[in-house]
Image (cartoon, coloured by chain):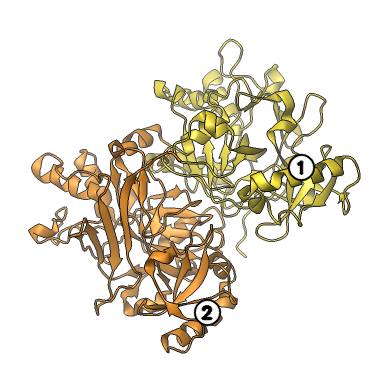
Chain colours: A orange, B yellow
Amino acid sequence: MKLATLNTGRDGELVIVSRDLSRAVRATEIAATLQQAIENWDELAPRLEERYAELNEGRAEGAFDLEVESLHSPLPRSYHWADGSAYLNHVQLVRQARGAEMPETFWTDPLMYQGGGDRFLAPTEHIEAVSEEHGIDFEGELAVITDDVPMAVTPEQAAGHIKLIMLVNDVSLRGLIPGELAKGFGFFQAKPASSFSPICVTPDELGDAWQDGRVHLPLTVHLNGEKFGEPEAGPDMVFGFPELVAHAAKTRYLGAGAIVGSGTVSNPDADGGPGKPIADGGVGYSCLAEVRMVEKILHGEMQTPFMRFGDRVRIEMFDRQGKSIFGAIDQRVVKHEAR
Amino acid sequence: MKLATLNTGRDGELVIVSRDLSRAVRATEIAATLQQAIENWDELAPRLEERYAELNEGRAEGAFDLEVESLHSPLPRSYHWADGSAYLNHVQLVRQARGAEMPETFWTDPLMYQGGGDRFLAPTEHIEAVSEEHGIDFEGELAVITDDVPMAVTPEQAAGHIKLIMLVNDVSLRGLIPGELAKGFGFFQAKPASSFSPICVTPDELGDAWQDGRVHLPLTVHLNGEKFGEPEAGPDMVFGFPELVAHAAKTRYLGAGAIVGSGTVSNPDADGGPGKPIADGGVGYSCLAEVRMVEKILHGEMQTPFMRFGDRVRIEMFDRQGKSIFGAIDQRVVKHEAR
């Protein structure tokens, strides 16, 4: 099943989207919002699935042509947005670029930060930034939405609480990160509002690409219209989503509608090297920080700049038939003007 | 005006509470929940104030005797819970106890972490913890609730977005903090669900105790029925709430219902010393970590244990006439049992 949210007000309106993303139908009589649906998932999901079948078969009353620009992030806001960093190649690169070792425990204990969920960006909304000096970057990721998760669940139990999957652009302000991390309390100003793919899907939509709590497909990232990365999201994800959800729930209950992200998708080379740009025959990257670190490691200095006002990033995932699964996050960076 | 939320379902039901906390009346016809009220504050606050006046004058239809046990935290969940650490005495003590200097920038750039807002504890709900080994601690604090805050506001502008004030118990698992902070991403498992005072109030309720964006009254903390601390919340708060809200909004918009906390209330001695226990004539503390650090500094070792299952903490604030302003957070620690 594929779901989305019309961009109308703070929580929008839940719609069911056809498998090919061309058509949609309001879910109003089942659930007004995705938050409401996820809070009553066991009861409502079968009814939503029924409408989804009708929509795909062209017999859903009230169906309309879907325009992706009319959609907000599936949850326009969330009470819990936690982002892991499960692709350790990314973490190793960051550390290698500054000459630091990665602790052994990073292979067994996931990195995760708590983000702000009060006002996500829509998938095609401009990214407002105060200054280019903040080092504006995108991070292409996957994320899951859970229902209510009990405290201290095992990864096996957590797997059953993963109800929906989507893409993320975890916007990052790299220039603010060193100062914030040095203070010891983690990211805050360096992680402004994220955006999510226009469509979220139930795991069964991914077929056998959903395995071991990972999505085994490449994530496609374009920067200003040129392919920037196509890293595989499956094999190098050291912690699967069930492990990440269990980590988040270790000392607390998670409320329905909690979003847990994967961290920047990143692949090392087959020979263990740091990965190569698309132009050099590699799979590229899903954030600018990574290509900059590779440049530093290989050439001694960072060459690629961070995003400038007007730059555009597009993040999408295609199935093995080349069809877009989630629709595209497609955003331009603009200068914040006080209103 | 004083507001509270009946503990019925995920968002509860908004009630208006009399100044003396004895009576309440449902706000249903004005706003079903506090979240709804804060999203439409300019329009709804005058109507809530009107009902509040009626309630205080004993002429509100449908009023009932208030039982604090029936209340949830004012916002049972929030899309944005950010906690500052504005009492630098607390920060200095932590650092001094481990022999580290506090950076000069801490006096100008607030510490703040992002917390999880999906499932706050009710003010009289048990604190479930997996293990005493996690180092269970309370932190007595103040917090404000804002309406929509634009990106990059000044502290002067931020002040106008502070609509409600309440107390917090920022439950902390001290045993998990060193490991998490060493990973560099800040707190996560170490900061499980917080609870808030049963009643939140508009700034005008505090009279001249609300000055410079600070609450100039002592915060009273009892541990197992004995007074543990009565530190002054006003003078040693290095950053007022307007500065904290502006810090939170530096690179993003804050959605209505955002909660920003002060950090653990803490006073140094008049002579600049680290503060003394109540028994030694001091004002005591609002968390266990602090008395332990003072013990370490003064006596070379920590003596006071963290909370054990069955221990009880009570956090309250009285006006200059000795009347409770917000009602009490009053919680017992219990062992988490899988359900």
Q: Are marks 1 and 2 in contact (CB under 8 Å)?
A: no
Q: Whole-Å distance between the Cαs marked 1 and 2? A: 42 Å
Residue B328 image position (x, y, % from top left): 75, 39
Residue picked out by circle 2 = A48
Is residue A155 depicted above or below A112 in this figure? below
Residue A297 lies, with reference to residue B88, above or below; the image says below
Q: Is residue B309 visible?
A: no
Residue placed at 15% from the left, 59% from the top? A269
Camera sees residue A176: yes
- Left or right placement of residue A142 versus residue B314 in this view: left
- State left or right for residue A142 relative to residue A253: left
In x, y percent, where is residue A190? Answer: 37, 41
Q: What residue type is disc 1 on? A: Glu
The answer for which chain carries disc 1 is B
Give the residue at mark 1.
Answer: B49
Q: Nearer the viewer, residue A245 or B48?
A: B48
